[in-house]
Protein backbone atom coordinates (compact mmCIF):
# COMPACT_ATOMS: atom_id res chain seq x y z
CA UNK A 1 0.00 0.00 0.00
CA UNK A 2 1.26 3.51 -0.81
CA UNK A 3 1.75 6.23 1.78
CA UNK A 4 -1.57 7.81 0.88
CA UNK A 5 -3.41 4.56 1.59
CA UNK A 6 -1.59 3.99 4.86
CA UNK A 7 -2.60 7.45 6.09
CA UNK A 8 -6.23 7.06 4.97
CA UNK A 9 -7.46 6.29 8.47
CA UNK A 10 -5.91 9.48 9.83
CA UNK A 11 -6.64 12.08 7.18
CA UNK A 12 -9.35 12.63 4.58
CA UNK A 13 -11.22 15.50 2.98
CA UNK A 14 -14.45 16.52 4.68
CA UNK A 15 -17.23 16.65 2.12
CA UNK A 16 -20.37 16.87 4.24
CA UNK A 17 -21.35 17.35 7.84
CA UNK A 18 -23.20 15.33 10.44
CA UNK A 19 -25.42 17.04 12.95
CA UNK A 20 -25.32 15.59 16.46
CA UNK A 21 -29.10 15.35 16.51
CA UNK A 22 -29.14 13.31 13.29
CA UNK A 23 -30.37 9.78 13.74
CA UNK A 24 -28.63 6.85 12.07
CA UNK A 25 -30.78 3.84 11.26
CA UNK A 26 -28.96 0.59 10.52
CA UNK A 27 -30.94 -2.08 8.68
CA UNK A 28 -29.46 -5.40 9.74
CA UNK A 29 -28.21 -6.77 13.07
CA UNK A 30 -25.39 -9.02 11.94
CA UNK A 31 -21.68 -8.66 12.67
CA UNK A 32 -21.28 -5.75 10.21
CA UNK A 33 -24.34 -3.87 11.47
CA UNK A 34 -23.29 -4.45 15.07
CA UNK A 35 -19.78 -3.16 14.44
CA UNK A 36 -21.05 -0.04 12.66
CA UNK A 37 -23.50 0.56 15.52
CA UNK A 38 -20.74 0.14 18.11
CA UNK A 39 -18.34 2.53 16.38
CA UNK A 40 -21.05 5.14 15.79
CA UNK A 41 -22.39 4.92 19.35
CA UNK A 42 -18.87 5.13 20.76
CA UNK A 43 -18.65 8.57 19.16
CA UNK A 44 -21.98 9.72 20.49
CA UNK A 45 -24.25 9.14 17.49
CA UNK A 46 -27.97 8.45 17.91
CA UNK A 47 -28.16 4.89 16.57
CA UNK A 48 -31.05 2.48 16.06
CA UNK A 49 -30.52 -1.00 14.63
CA UNK A 50 -33.47 -2.63 12.86
CA UNK A 51 -33.52 -6.40 12.49
CA UNK A 52 -36.19 -8.27 10.53
CA UNK A 53 -35.90 -11.54 12.47
CA UNK A 54 -33.55 -11.70 15.45
CA UNK A 55 -30.02 -10.37 15.99
CA UNK A 56 -27.35 -12.51 14.37
CA UNK A 57 -29.85 -14.78 12.63
CA UNK A 58 -28.35 -14.44 9.14
CA UNK A 59 -24.84 -15.17 7.92
CA UNK A 60 -23.24 -14.27 11.25
CA UNK A 61 -24.34 -17.26 13.33
CA UNK A 62 -23.55 -19.61 10.45
CA UNK A 63 -20.03 -18.35 9.79
CA UNK A 64 -16.87 -20.40 10.30
CA UNK A 65 -15.29 -17.09 11.39
CA UNK A 66 -11.68 -17.39 10.22
CA UNK A 67 -9.82 -14.10 10.77
CA UNK A 68 -7.32 -13.97 7.92
CA UNK A 69 -6.00 -12.48 4.71
CA UNK A 70 -4.59 -15.74 3.38
CA UNK A 71 -6.03 -15.97 -0.11
CA UNK A 72 -7.16 -12.37 -0.55
CA UNK A 73 -6.31 -10.67 -3.86
CA UNK A 74 -5.63 -8.16 -5.36
CA UNK A 75 -3.19 -6.34 -3.09
CA UNK A 76 -5.73 -3.68 -2.08
CA UNK A 77 -8.13 -6.39 -0.88
CA UNK A 78 -5.32 -8.19 0.93
CA UNK A 79 -4.38 -4.91 2.66
CA UNK A 80 -8.00 -4.31 3.62
CA UNK A 81 -8.19 -7.68 5.34
CA UNK A 82 -4.85 -7.18 7.11
CA UNK A 83 -6.27 -3.94 8.53
CA UNK A 84 -9.35 -5.96 9.52
CA UNK A 85 -7.18 -8.45 11.42
CA UNK A 86 -5.52 -5.56 13.25
CA UNK A 87 -8.98 -4.24 14.05
CA UNK A 88 -9.72 -7.37 16.06
CA UNK A 89 -6.62 -6.78 18.16
CA UNK A 90 -7.80 -3.22 18.78
CA UNK A 91 -11.26 -4.42 19.80
CA UNK A 92 -9.72 -6.91 22.22
CA UNK A 93 -8.23 -3.95 24.08
CA UNK A 94 -11.54 -2.04 24.08
CA UNK A 95 -13.95 -4.86 24.88
CA UNK A 96 -12.75 -6.99 27.75
CA UNK A 97 -15.49 -9.60 27.29
CA UNK A 98 -14.47 -10.29 23.69
CA UNK A 99 -13.00 -13.76 23.18
CA UNK A 100 -10.54 -14.03 20.30
CA UNK A 101 -8.44 -17.13 19.67
CA UNK A 102 -5.09 -16.29 18.14
CA UNK A 103 -2.47 -18.91 17.40
CA UNK A 104 -2.71 -19.12 13.64
CA UNK A 105 -3.80 -21.78 11.17
CA UNK A 106 -2.07 -24.95 10.00
CA UNK A 107 -2.86 -26.15 6.48
CA UNK A 108 -1.69 -29.16 4.52
CA UNK A 109 -2.46 -30.50 1.06
CA UNK A 110 -1.54 -32.96 -1.66
CA UNK A 111 -1.34 -32.82 -5.46
CA UNK A 112 -2.40 -29.67 -7.29
CA UNK A 113 -3.64 -28.09 -4.05
CA UNK A 114 -0.13 -28.41 -2.63
CA UNK A 115 1.38 -26.52 -5.56
CA UNK A 116 -1.25 -23.81 -5.18
CA UNK A 117 -0.35 -23.56 -1.49
CA UNK A 118 3.34 -23.07 -2.31
CA UNK A 119 2.46 -20.33 -4.78
CA UNK A 120 0.16 -18.60 -2.30
CA UNK A 121 2.71 -18.72 0.52
CA UNK A 122 5.43 -17.29 -1.73
CA UNK A 123 3.15 -14.34 -2.58
CA UNK A 124 2.18 -13.83 1.05
CA UNK A 125 5.80 -13.83 2.18
CA UNK A 126 6.65 -11.19 -0.43
CA UNK A 127 3.79 -9.05 0.97
CA UNK A 128 5.02 -9.46 4.54
CA UNK A 129 2.34 -11.86 5.81
CA UNK A 130 3.38 -14.14 8.68
CA UNK A 131 2.97 -17.41 6.79
CA UNK A 132 5.62 -19.95 5.82
CA UNK A 133 5.96 -23.52 4.61
CA UNK A 134 6.54 -26.20 7.25
CA UNK A 135 7.55 -29.86 7.29
CA UNK A 136 5.34 -32.86 7.99
CA UNK A 137 6.63 -33.21 11.56
CA UNK A 138 5.82 -29.56 12.27
CA UNK A 139 2.12 -30.29 11.81
CA UNK A 140 2.11 -32.65 14.79
CA UNK A 141 4.14 -30.16 16.83
CA UNK A 142 1.67 -27.35 16.13
CA UNK A 143 -1.43 -29.59 16.21
CA UNK A 144 -0.70 -32.48 18.60
CA UNK A 145 -4.14 -33.98 17.98
CA UNK A 146 -3.71 -34.10 14.19
CA UNK A 147 -2.78 -37.16 12.16
CA UNK A 148 -2.35 -35.56 8.73
CA UNK A 149 -1.60 -38.58 6.55
CA UNK A 150 0.07 -37.91 3.17
CA UNK A 151 1.37 -34.35 2.87
CA UNK A 152 2.90 -32.74 -0.22
CA UNK A 153 2.94 -29.21 1.24
CA UNK A 154 2.03 -27.60 4.54
CA UNK A 155 2.10 -24.10 5.94
CA UNK A 156 1.65 -22.21 9.19
CA UNK A 157 -0.02 -18.78 9.08
CA UNK A 158 0.84 -17.63 12.57
CA UNK A 159 -0.96 -14.28 12.77
CA UNK A 160 -4.43 -15.62 12.03
CA UNK A 161 -7.21 -16.35 14.47
CA UNK A 162 -10.88 -17.03 14.95
CA UNK A 163 -13.87 -16.08 17.06
CA UNK A 164 -17.11 -17.68 18.03
CA UNK A 165 -19.12 -15.39 15.72
CA UNK A 166 -22.12 -15.11 18.00
CA UNK A 167 -20.04 -14.36 21.09
CA UNK A 168 -18.17 -11.63 19.21
CA UNK A 169 -21.37 -10.29 17.68
CA UNK A 170 -23.21 -10.15 21.00
CA UNK A 171 -20.28 -8.40 22.64
CA UNK A 172 -20.29 -5.70 19.94
CA UNK A 173 -24.05 -5.22 19.96
CA UNK A 174 -24.34 -5.16 23.74
CA UNK A 175 -21.47 -2.69 23.94
CA UNK A 176 -23.25 -0.46 21.42
CA UNK A 177 -26.42 -0.64 23.53
CA UNK A 178 -24.51 0.30 26.67
CA UNK A 179 -23.42 3.45 24.84
CA UNK A 180 -26.98 4.35 23.89
CA UNK A 181 -27.76 2.45 20.70
CA UNK A 182 -31.16 0.77 20.52
CA UNK A 183 -32.14 -2.44 18.76
CA UNK A 184 -35.62 -3.11 17.35
CA UNK A 185 -36.66 -6.65 16.37
CA UNK A 186 -38.53 -8.19 14.75
CA UNK A 187 -38.69 -5.03 12.68
CA UNK A 188 -38.48 -5.44 8.92
CA UNK A 189 -37.92 -2.48 6.61
CA UNK A 190 -40.77 -2.43 4.09
CA UNK A 191 -40.07 0.88 2.37
CA UNK A 192 -37.64 3.80 2.18
CA UNK A 193 -38.90 7.40 2.20
CA UNK A 194 -37.03 10.05 0.21
CA UNK A 195 -37.29 13.75 -0.45
CA UNK A 196 -35.04 16.13 -2.37
CA UNK A 197 -32.53 13.44 -3.30
CA UNK A 198 -32.04 12.23 0.28
CA UNK A 199 -33.37 9.43 2.43
CA UNK A 200 -35.70 10.81 5.09
CA UNK A 201 -36.91 7.65 6.80
CA UNK A 202 -38.13 4.10 6.50
CA UNK A 203 -41.41 2.28 6.73
CA UNK A 204 -41.21 -0.81 8.91
CA UNK A 205 -43.42 -3.49 10.38
CA UNK A 206 -43.34 -1.35 13.53
CA UNK A 207 -44.30 1.88 11.79
CA UNK A 208 -42.51 4.82 10.19
CA UNK A 209 -39.15 6.07 11.44
CA UNK A 210 -37.34 9.25 10.42
CA UNK A 211 -33.59 9.34 9.97
CA UNK A 212 -30.64 11.51 9.01
CA UNK A 213 -28.65 8.55 7.66
CA UNK A 214 -29.61 5.03 6.63
CA UNK A 215 -27.12 2.16 6.62
CA UNK A 216 -27.96 -0.99 4.68
CA UNK A 217 -26.10 -3.87 6.35
CA UNK A 218 -28.77 -6.54 6.02
CA UNK A 219 -26.64 -9.33 4.57
CA UNK A 220 -28.27 -11.19 1.70
CA UNK A 221 -31.37 -9.00 2.09
CA UNK A 222 -29.38 -5.85 1.27
CA UNK A 223 -30.06 -6.01 -2.51
CA UNK A 224 -33.82 -6.06 -1.89
CA UNK A 225 -33.65 -2.99 0.35
CA UNK A 226 -31.32 -1.16 -2.04
CA UNK A 227 -33.67 -1.74 -4.97
CA UNK A 228 -36.30 0.32 -3.12
CA UNK A 229 -34.27 3.38 -4.14
CA UNK A 230 -32.95 1.98 -7.45
CA UNK A 231 -29.50 1.12 -6.11
CA UNK A 232 -27.81 -2.05 -7.36
CA UNK A 233 -26.05 -4.27 -4.80
CA UNK A 234 -25.38 -7.44 -6.81
CA UNK A 235 -24.70 -10.59 -4.80
CA UNK A 236 -24.24 -14.17 -5.93
CA UNK A 237 -25.51 -17.22 -4.09
CA UNK A 238 -22.86 -18.88 -1.94
CA UNK A 239 -24.24 -21.41 0.55
CA UNK A 240 -22.15 -23.09 3.22
CA UNK A 241 -22.90 -26.07 5.47
CA UNK A 242 -21.22 -26.52 8.86
CA UNK A 243 -21.39 -29.22 11.52
CA UNK A 244 -21.24 -28.09 15.15
CA UNK A 245 -20.53 -30.42 18.07
CA UNK A 246 -21.58 -30.22 21.68
CA UNK A 247 -18.94 -28.77 24.03
CA UNK A 248 -15.91 -31.07 24.37
CA UNK A 249 -12.57 -31.04 26.16
CA UNK A 250 -9.81 -29.02 24.51
CA UNK A 251 -8.56 -30.71 21.33
CA UNK A 252 -7.43 -27.84 19.06
CA UNK A 253 -5.74 -24.55 19.94
CA UNK A 254 -5.32 -23.55 16.29
CA UNK A 255 -7.35 -23.73 13.11
CA UNK A 256 -6.69 -26.96 11.20
CA UNK A 257 -7.22 -27.19 7.45
CA UNK A 258 -6.65 -30.66 6.04
CA UNK A 259 -7.77 -32.05 2.68
CA UNK A 260 -11.54 -31.60 2.51
CA UNK A 261 -11.97 -30.50 6.13
CA UNK A 262 -11.76 -27.11 7.84
CA UNK A 263 -11.78 -27.55 11.62
CA UNK A 264 -11.70 -25.28 14.66
CA UNK A 265 -12.73 -25.38 18.30
CA UNK A 266 -14.49 -22.45 19.95
CA UNK A 267 -13.69 -21.23 23.48
CA UNK A 268 -16.77 -23.03 24.81
CA UNK A 269 -15.42 -26.37 23.52
CA UNK A 270 -17.70 -26.70 20.51
CA UNK A 271 -15.97 -27.94 17.36
CA UNK A 272 -17.02 -26.48 14.00
CA UNK A 273 -16.17 -28.15 10.69
CA UNK A 274 -17.02 -27.79 7.03
CA UNK A 275 -15.75 -29.24 3.77
CA UNK A 276 -14.32 -26.04 2.22
CA UNK A 277 -14.93 -22.30 1.81
CA UNK A 278 -16.54 -22.49 -1.63
CA UNK A 279 -20.24 -22.72 -2.41
CA UNK A 280 -21.61 -25.99 -1.05
CA UNK A 281 -22.80 -28.40 -3.72
CA UNK A 282 -25.12 -30.23 -1.31
CA UNK A 283 -27.41 -28.13 0.89
CA UNK A 284 -28.41 -30.91 3.25
CA UNK A 285 -28.67 -30.18 6.98
CA UNK A 286 -29.77 -33.60 8.17
CA UNK A 287 -28.06 -35.34 11.03
CA UNK A 288 -26.57 -37.76 8.51
CA UNK A 289 -25.00 -34.86 6.58
CA UNK A 290 -23.52 -33.48 9.77
CA UNK A 291 -22.11 -36.87 10.75
CA UNK A 292 -20.44 -37.12 7.32
CA UNK A 293 -18.74 -33.76 7.84
CA UNK A 294 -17.65 -34.74 11.33
CA UNK A 295 -16.37 -38.13 10.17
CA UNK A 296 -14.34 -36.42 7.45
CA UNK A 297 -12.77 -34.13 10.06
CA UNK A 298 -11.93 -37.15 12.23
CA UNK A 299 -9.67 -38.47 9.47
CA UNK A 300 -7.36 -35.52 10.12
CA UNK A 301 -8.01 -35.20 13.86
CA UNK A 302 -8.91 -38.65 15.25
CA UNK A 303 -9.60 -37.30 18.75
CA UNK A 304 -12.76 -35.74 17.33
CA UNK A 305 -14.32 -39.18 17.85
CA UNK A 306 -14.76 -37.91 21.42
CA UNK A 307 -17.18 -35.25 20.18
CA UNK A 308 -20.93 -35.47 19.63
CA UNK A 309 -22.79 -33.74 16.81
CA UNK A 310 -25.13 -31.04 18.08
CA UNK A 311 -26.37 -29.03 15.06
CA UNK A 312 -25.91 -28.61 11.33
CA UNK A 313 -26.29 -25.14 9.82
CA UNK A 314 -26.86 -23.87 6.29
CA UNK A 315 -25.82 -20.27 5.80
CA UNK A 316 -25.56 -17.95 2.81
CA UNK A 317 -22.43 -15.87 2.53
CA UNK A 318 -22.87 -12.19 1.69
CA UNK A 319 -20.79 -12.55 -1.46
CA UNK A 320 -20.82 -9.64 -3.97
CA UNK A 321 -20.89 -10.39 -7.68
CA UNK A 322 -17.18 -9.62 -8.11
CA UNK A 323 -16.18 -11.26 -4.77
CA UNK A 324 -15.15 -7.94 -3.21
CA UNK A 325 -16.80 -5.69 -0.60
CA UNK A 326 -19.49 -3.17 -1.46
CA UNK A 327 -19.11 -0.35 1.04
CA UNK A 328 -19.77 3.38 1.05
CA UNK A 329 -22.42 5.95 0.14
CA UNK A 330 -24.66 4.90 -2.73
CA UNK A 331 -24.29 6.98 -5.89
CA UNK A 332 -26.88 9.76 -5.91
CA UNK A 333 -27.81 9.27 -2.24
CA UNK A 334 -25.61 11.33 0.09
CA UNK A 335 -27.05 9.82 3.27
CA UNK A 336 -27.54 6.18 2.22
CA UNK A 337 -24.61 3.98 3.23
CA UNK A 338 -24.17 0.38 2.01
CA UNK A 339 -22.06 -2.34 3.65
CA UNK A 340 -22.25 -5.79 2.04
CA UNK A 341 -19.32 -8.19 1.92
CA UNK A 342 -17.89 -11.63 2.33
CA UNK A 343 -14.99 -11.74 4.76
CA UNK A 344 -17.52 -10.04 6.98
CA UNK A 345 -15.97 -11.50 10.12
CA UNK A 346 -12.41 -10.47 9.29
CA UNK A 347 -13.45 -7.03 8.06
CA UNK A 348 -16.11 -6.11 10.62
CA UNK A 349 -13.94 -4.12 13.09
CA UNK A 350 -12.40 -2.10 10.26
CA UNK A 351 -15.66 -1.52 8.39
CA UNK A 352 -17.33 -0.33 11.59
CA UNK A 353 -14.52 2.15 12.20
CA UNK A 354 -14.41 3.43 8.61
CA UNK A 355 -18.18 3.66 8.20
CA UNK A 356 -18.37 5.76 11.37
CA UNK A 357 -15.60 8.01 10.03
CA UNK A 358 -17.33 8.51 6.70
CA UNK A 359 -20.80 9.08 8.19
CA UNK A 360 -19.83 11.29 11.13
CA UNK A 361 -16.92 13.21 9.66
CA UNK A 362 -17.87 13.34 6.00
CA UNK A 363 -14.53 11.78 5.13
CA UNK A 364 -13.88 9.71 2.03
CA UNK A 365 -11.46 7.01 3.14
CA UNK A 366 -8.99 6.13 0.40
CA UNK A 367 -8.67 2.55 1.66
CA UNK A 368 -12.22 1.87 0.42
CA UNK A 369 -11.80 3.50 -2.99
CA UNK A 370 -11.90 0.24 -4.97
CA UNK A 371 -15.01 -1.05 -3.23
CA UNK A 372 -17.64 1.64 -3.66
CA UNK A 373 -21.23 0.79 -4.65
CA UNK A 374 -20.88 3.14 -7.63
CA UNK A 375 -18.82 0.55 -9.53
CA UNK A 376 -22.07 -1.26 -10.33
CA UNK A 377 -23.93 1.87 -11.45
Image (cartoon, helix red, strand yellow):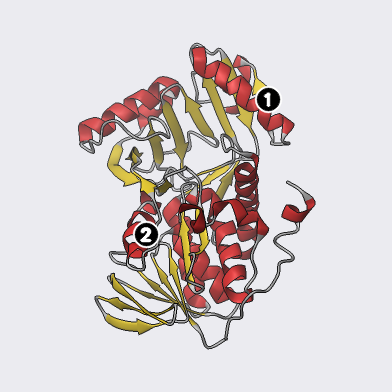
Residue at which label 1 appears:
122
Q: Secondary structure at mark 1?
A: helix
Residue 131 image-quadrant placement? top right
Q: Is residue 204 left or right of residue 344?
A: left
Q: Residue visible at 40% across and 42% down?
A: 270
Give how far across and how far down residue 167 sits, in percent.
Answer: 45, 56
Q: Is residue 125 visible?
A: yes
Q: Is residue 99 left or right of residue 53?
A: right
Give how far across and how far down residue 23 sits, in percent.
Answer: 47, 82
Position of residue 97 relative to residue 73, above or below, is below
Q: Label 2 neighbourhood size at 10 Å, few (<14), some (14-19), many (20+)?
A: many
Q: Label 1 vs label 2: CA separation?
A: 37 Å
Q: Are marks 1 and 2 in contact (CB under 8 Å)?
A: no
Residue 58 image-quadrant placement? bottom left
Q: Residue visible at 72% across and 35% down?
A: 127
Give how far across and how far down residue 76 sits, in percent.
Answer: 64, 45
Q: Label 1 neighbourhood size at 10 Å, few (<14), some (14-19), many (20+)?
A: some
Q: Is residue 246 left or right of residue 359?
A: left
Position of residue 7 relative to residue 142, above or below, is below
Q: Earlier in the sequence, mark 1 or mark 2?
A: 1
Q: Residue visible at 49% across and 18% down?
A: 147
Q: Nearer the viewer, residue 29 or 363?
A: 363
Residue 276 image-quadrant placement? top left
Q: Nearer the viewer, residue 225 or 99?
A: 225
Q: Secondary structure at mark 2?
A: helix
Residue at which label 2 appears:
222
Q: Quadrant of the C terminus?
A: bottom left
Extreme-bottom residue of the structure? 21
Amino acid sequence: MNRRGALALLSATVVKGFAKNDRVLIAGAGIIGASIAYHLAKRGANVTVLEAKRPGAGATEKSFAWINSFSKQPRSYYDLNVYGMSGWRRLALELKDLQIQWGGSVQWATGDAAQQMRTTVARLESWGYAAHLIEHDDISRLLPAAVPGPVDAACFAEQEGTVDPMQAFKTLLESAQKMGASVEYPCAVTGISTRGGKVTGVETTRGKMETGFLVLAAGVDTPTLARMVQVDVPLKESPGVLAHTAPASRILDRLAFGPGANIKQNPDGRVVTGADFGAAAVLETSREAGERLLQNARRSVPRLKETRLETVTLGYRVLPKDDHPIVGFAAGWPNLYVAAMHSGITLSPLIGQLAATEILDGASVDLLHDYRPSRFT
